[in-house]
Amino acid sequence: MSGDQFDLFGDPLPSAPAAARAVSAGRASKQREVGPAAFDDALLDVASALPDDVFLGTSSWSFSGWRGLVFDASYPETLLSRQGLGAYAAHPLFGSVGIDRTFYAPISEDEFRRYAKQAATADDAFKFLVKAPMLFTGPRLRSEDGVWTDNDAFLDSSLATTQFVLPATRGLAEHCGPLVFQFPPLGPRYTRAPAKFADRLAEFLLALPKLALPACYAVEVRDPELLCDEYTAALNAANATHCIAIHARMPQAREQAHYWRESSRILPLVIRWSLHSGFKYEEAKERYAPFDAIVDPDENGLAQVGALIEEAHATSRASFAIVNNKAEGSAPLTVRRIATLLAKSGSEASGNDG
């Protein structure tokens, strides 16, 4: 992006971010350094029009099938997990990435700091969206032998602060974006009493440390019954926002947007495009692997995401749109479709203004 150009929404563009720093040296001599793919002119043109408050990215980055889309070669996924983030951050459309591994277990402040160092660009604009551990959002946990028990750490704000919020915010520092508390399906105990869940949620969120933008708390639910006025009030009370989940279990993004609009007038738009409607997770994974092509384009979902990003930008709010491979088949290509749609819409708007 050049300072004497204007973005697709008519705002002055900041200076172009430089390529991400090279992946840390000192690895085993036989390991290759992960390099970024070569990007075509059309993609670079689309990237040059994205405003600096739109953060597009994918859920994780460790996919060997992304050769030519993100990486310059096909690398083992274990290597990509350790060293691929720098090449990922060099992608012109990627201003963010989701850290999903934290949903399964907390990670340390040092691990977060290592991620931030790998993804650092010249303008330090790259931001992370981080999922909170299910330890704090699942009312029941299953042991290794398959036995379910009540989870004493469910909505425990003290544990969430020490094991998640502080390590993430201190380790990522200026690279910290939304911290997402994703609640799995909670069952009738909670869906039959959504107001009681909202009360517990408000108490939990209010006890967490205050955050400074672009870091914020976002809540993602997988039970439509929990979306109610009391839920919105809980988010408002704690200065948190609703994370729009594009998922087979949830209403359309345009319907969920009400809870984002009503929960805050300043907090970012947070979208996680997780799963194509009509598929279960494992079905989609098997159908779409190795995640190098759009298999089931979702034009309706694409249009809704684009419209919401435009709305957020028009109201001076940042947008985070994080895409999973299971959305359409290939998260990098879905991100490109979102960016291209925004570019087309912005070009048409400029033409009408003229």
Image: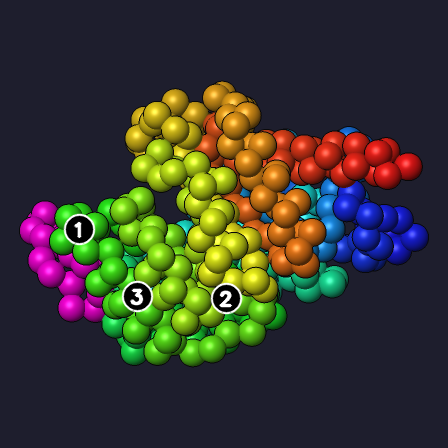
Q: CA distance from mark 3 to mark 1?
A: 15 Å
Whichever of labels 2 and 3 marks the residue nearer the N terminus, that label is 3
Q: Amino acid at mark 1?
A: Arg
Can you tell which of label 2 and label 3 is closer to the viewer?
3
In the image, 341 versus 98, the foreground residue is: 341
- For the point 74% across and 62% down, the residue is 122
Q: Secondary structure at mark 1?
A: loop
Residue 141 visible in the picture: no
**Residue 293 shown left or right of residue 52 in the figure:** left
**Residue 260 shown left or right of residue 198 in the figure:** right
Residue 192: assigned label: 1
Whole-percent x, y for residue 285 in the image = 37, 30
Q: CA distance from mark 2 to mark 1?
A: 29 Å
- Residue with the mark numbered 3: 201
- For the point 56% across and 58% down, the residue is 268
Q: Which residues are magenta?
A: 138-154
| Label 3: few (<14), some (14–19) or many (≥20) C-alpha neighbours in 10 Å | some
- Residue with the mark numbered 2: 216
Q: CA distance from mark 2 to mark 3?
A: 15 Å
Can you tell which of label 3 and label 1 is closer to the viewer?
1
Q: Amino acid at mark 2?
A: Cys
Whichever of labels 3 and 1 marks the residue nearer the N terminus, that label is 1
Is 280 within the magenta?
no
Whichever of labels 2 and 1 marks the residue nearer the N terminus, that label is 1
Q: Secondary structure at mark 3?
A: helix
In the image, 73 versus 141, the foreground residue is: 141
Q: Are marks 2 and 3 in contact (CB under 8 Å)?
A: no
